Amino acid sequence: MSEVVMGFSPWAVPPVGIAVVAVAGVFGAGWAWLAVGVLVVVGVVWLGWAVLREQRSDSVTDMGSTIRPIALGVIRRGDELLVFEGRDEVKGETYYRPLGGGIEFGERAVDALKRELVEELDAELIVGERLGVLENVFIWQGKPGHEIAFVFAAAFNEHSFYVREDLKILDDDSVTVRWIAMTDFRAGTKILYPNGLTELLSSE
């Protein structure tokens, strides 16, 4: 049984050799080398096309096929919650979410939260109890997303962060971090993500 690799059959090699010998016999050795060169170029182009075709079919990934684990910190100032302000231009929606971010492979959720706050605000956190775990399936900027959010009570190690009204994310100063009253989220005048977080914090 012949082996076929990426659509190439080894039985194609003998006819190529026969064709080259035939060209050499009719037109001379110089033409034979030219035939070999043409065949090599054609072969390389064909092989490249076959490889790209295979990679393209394998590399198509559904944007909603990956579940992302994240860790979020609920940092309070009285009845206010520290959140960053985001914008979904497709929905025309301004929303808010506690600080935090993705959990890396092999990293615990608590450690991920501490790392994210150092990266975002250069702030050290005291992480308290886990308040809950929320599953969030959503559409953002027209694309599907799926997150599992570990939500922790947290506090700044330095008091100076509590007296600042607006903060900026270090690696993106276009993102504003601010204190928002929980009453705004409970009343629905402002949107808090992930879904279910307002109810979770209101039940405490």
Image (spheres, grey):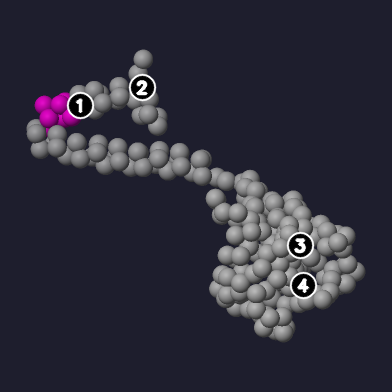
Nearest to viewer (mark 3 / mark 2): 3
Estimate the spatial distance between the alpha carbons at disc 4 and disc 3, rounded to whole Å.
Answer: 16 Å
Q: Residue at x 76, y 62 (%)?
A: 193
| Side of 62 relative to 81 (left or right) | left
Q: Please tell me whether residue 22 is drawn above or below residue 111 in the rendered image.
A: above
Q: Please tell me whether residue 52 is drawn above or below residue 158 in the rendered image.
A: above
Q: Which residues are magenta?
A: 20-27
Residue 75, quarter of the rendered image: bottom right
| Element at label 3 | loop
* Dot 4 or dot 3, earlier in sequence: 4
| Side of 113 relative to 48 (left or right) | right
Estimate the spatial distance between the alpha carbons at disc 4 and disc 2, rounded to whole Å.
Answer: 66 Å
What is the x, y in percent for residue 201?
83, 62
Nearest to viewer (mark 1 / mark 2): 2
Q: Are marks 3 and 2 in contact (CB under 8 Å)?
A: no
Nearest to viewer (mark 1 / mark 4): 4
In this rendering, does residue 166 appear at all?
Answer: no
Dot 4 amino acid type: Arg
Q: Is residue 25 magenta?
A: yes
Dot 1 amino acid type: Gly
* Dot 1 or dot 4, earlier in sequence: 1
Mark number, residue 76: 4
Estimate the spatial distance between the alpha carbons at disc 1 and disc 2, rounded to whole Å.
Answer: 19 Å
Q: Which residue is mark 2?
A: 3
Q: Are marks 3 and 1 in contact (CB under 8 Å)?
A: no
Nearest to viewer (mark 4 / mark 3): 4
